[in-house]
Every structure is written in structure tokens, then in C-alpha cells.
Image: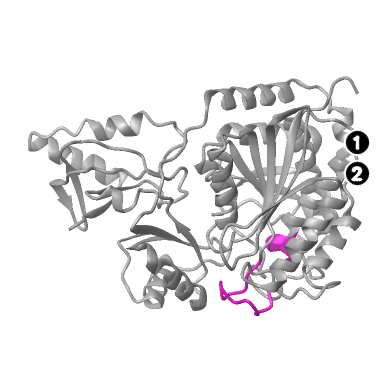
Amino acid sequence: MHVLVVMTMAMVMVSLMACCAHGQFLAAIPHAISSLPPTVDTLSMTLPKLDIHASLPGFALASSSLSLSVAAGTGGSFLPSNAIILSNSPSLYLAPEPRRLLVVLEQMQLSSTGDHRSWAHRVRKAVGVKEIYARGPNVVYDMPVEAYEDFAAKIGAADVDAHLLPMPAQPLVAVSANATARVARIRDTVRALQNPNPIISTLAARVSPTNIRSTLEYITGVTSSITTRNSLSLGAEEAATWLRTQLETLGYDVEVQHFKSGYAPNVIGTLPGRFETTSVVVGAHYDSRSKDLYSKTNPAPGADDNGSGTASMLELARVLATSGVNYDYTVRIGFWAGEEQGLLGSKAYAKKCRDADLDIIAYINSDMVAYRPSANAVQLALMERDSSTLLNDALFAIMELYEPSLRTCFSPACCSDHASFNGQGYLATGVFENCGPILDPMYHNQGDVVDRPGFDIDGELATACRAIVAATLSFAGIDPTL
């Protein structure tokens, strides 16, 4: 029989003291925690042999051989904040072909988010089974791998406003010291500048709200037949084909990555730099969803989520390709599918990059960058979860230099594609339209269209796009001979 235990960090410390009273000092657990990078605050630990030494209501601390390994989760990405999982059968979960799966559901952080307990009850009612752990906006379920699709379909059809986060079946990959040092140098260089680089400023100023609107109108169905870009729909396939054509027309080398049967593909455009083997990756998911996560037909125009990010990436692609400037490092621009179903497309691409040992300076994500309530000033948030503190510092410096009037901040919003790269050991973060939780009242709604109050192309979206252009150029580097 396999045993799975979920604990908070506080419970670990209480249990450690209880264990010491029994003459059992579990030195490996605090050592494992203290030896991790400071950005890792959510852990999954496994012990091959399980002996219960101390217990609390619903929880237990176990030890025997004290052979532990970090399995997954940084910054609250895959487990509720400060949670630890102990198992006596780690091979069921951590293997090339695992037999069991941990799935975290997170309540969407909307400005109107209600009581966590009532939300957890609705989730429980929708799936018909009880979670193994619930705390705040998170619940954790344990299931056979083959049960996941049915589980996800029930969640998708239940209108419970939940993000699905299947826990990966491989350990976290550490960020290399070289990658960290490189981004630190870029950050320090930007901070030392008294004035913006004129080439970067000139190129950022070429961002065209007219072009952005044109992209949005096509992918939301104003000038096309697309009614939804759900990853399982024909509309998503049409959007992928259109994006591929746009990139090829601009002169990009285009890769179409089919990552899961029945799903629309990832589309990645590559602009080679002088040092082709090192790259900057930027991206956005182009899929959309209605309240029903798996509906192929429900209207889901997704202008803000995530037509706005998609349009910002395509405009970035246009600015870079038509700049007449050579770049030091290769730029890869990704358009991901399957984000709404659990970051499926970006996970597949990030894993492919890691398997190929691709040298990536940074990954920058663009998700929901167009909605601004009329009372709010233009602002741009970076993701405080699943992200690199160092990379965020560098981006804040870049935005302060090139968009000095822009209000910058953090957002606790959950679960976008930067987490996929973070999990593979790449420095990653994302940009988002506002500080705090999601404010857009049309989130995952058929009312998420371009022409509506608060959808701000000329202000919010164009500013976000200029900031992304400046950041991409700062990391990609400009040939100093030009």
C-alpha cells in the first residue's frame, strides 16, 4: 500500500520537535530545505521507506532511510504554498511513465473571488471525490494517471473557476550559475545607463496599435471565421496556420510543434543572432476558453486572454524582423496552445529545450496585457510566482529606463506559461496587465471582445508591447558595429 502525506512547513517543524522527543532527529529534512535556493518555497519530498514518528490531525511526518529528493514546485507553482508531500512510493509519481498523478487546483484570483471553503466544496461536488489537501485557494487531488482526462473534463464542465496544475513527473532542474551571472550582468548594465539606448528606444517606438488591432480582429473573429481558439477546436488550428503564415512572411524560420493528439500545435518563429546557439525566448498562449474548459464550439473570442499577449508577440516579431538591426543572440518567439488545459504546449516546448540542452538567456511571457479600468493608470505587473527574482529585477530596471511613466508592480496571478520554463531550470517571468488579482470582468467569458469598455489597445497594450520590445532587445543584444 502506498502512503501519501501532505504537510505545511509549520507542521514539519512541530513534527520535528515531536520526533526529537522520541529520540528521532530527522536532520535530512531541514538540511534538504536549507540547501535549496531561496526561490524554492514549495517542495515535494519522497522517502523510499515510511515510518510514522509523529502525527497531527490529517498529517504525519515520516522517516526511515531519510533518502529525500526534491520533486517539483517553486514559488507555489505546483503545490499550495509551503506544502510538503511525503510518499513511500515515489516511483508511482516520479518516473518516465508514472502510474499516479498529483493535481493541484487553484481558485482563479479574480477581484470578485469568494470564500475558499465554498469553492473547495463545489470542486469536491463536481469531481465526486475528496481532495487529499485543502488550504486557502488550493486543493490537491491524487489519482491514477489515466483518470486525469475525465477529472479535468468534470472540472471544465462544472464552472468552478479553477486552474488545473498537474504536477510534473520529474525533479526540478536547477538554474545554472552561468545563466544567473549573465542576467545579473545585463541587469547591472541597464541600471548603470543614464539614458536609454537610442536604437532600442527607436525600435520600441515602432510598435503600432493599428497592427495590434488588426491581429486582434482576426484572431477574435471580427475579420475571420474564428469563434473560439479552444485548443481542441478548428478555430485554434486556423489561428495556428495564420500565425505561421505571418511569421514566414516576416522571414522567420518557423517550427510547428505537435505536442498532443487532438490539440492545436505550438508555433515558434526563430530569428538567428550572431551567436546562434544562445537565445532569448518570448511567448504567449494563443488558445482561449469559455467557462467549459473543453468545449470546441462555445464562443470564446479571448481578446484579453490571450489575444492581447498573442498580438504583442506578433507585433514584436514584426518590429524585430523589419528593424535592419543584427542581434547578438537568437530570438525565438513562441505561440503556445494548451495553456488553458494545464500549460501543455509550453511544457512540451520547454522540455524539448531542456532535453536539447538549449542555452536560453531568459524566457518572457505575455498573458493578459490589455484590460485597464478607466480609473486606473497604465500599469504593468511582473509575476511574483513561478518566476526568477533576478530576472524580475532586470525587467523592472528595463521598464524604468524605457517606460519611466509606467507604474510597475507584482501580481500574484497564477499559472501561465513562464512556469513551464521555470520548471526546466530557465530564468523566466511574465508580464500582466495590473497589480493584484485579475480585474477583467470578461475573463473566460464570451464577452472578452476587443471593442468594450476597459479594453485599451492604445494605452495598456501598446505600452506593454513597447516594454516587451525593449526587454527582448536588451537581452538579445544589438551588434555594436551597426
Q: Which residue is mark 2?
A: 206
Count of marks overlaid on the render: 2
Q: CA distance from mark 1 to mark 2?
A: 7 Å
Whether residue 404 is visible to the viewer of this picture, yes or no, is no
**Residue drawn at 25 percent across, 54 percent down:** 4
Whether residue 304 is visible to the viewer of this picture, yes or no, is yes
What's drawn in magenta, residue-wise?
288-307
What x and y, as percent, mark residue 374?
77, 61
**Residue drawn at 42 percent across, 53 percent down:** 167
Front residue of 287 and 130: 287
**Residue drawn at 70 percent across, 47 percent down:** 380
Does the CB distance between marks 1 and 2 fall below 8 Å? yes
Q: Which residue is mark 1?
A: 202
Quadrant where the C terminus sits is top right
Amino acid type indicated by mark 1: Thr
In the rendered image, residue 304 lying in the magenta stretch gets the answer: yes
Amino acid type indicated by mark 2: Arg
What x and y, as percent, mark residue 311?
78, 56
Q: Which mark is residue 333?
A: none
What x and y, as percent, mark residue 312?
78, 52
Quadrant where the N terminus sits is bottom left
In which quadrant of the rendered view does residue 287 lie?
bottom right
Vertical placement of residue 330 versus 11, above or below: above
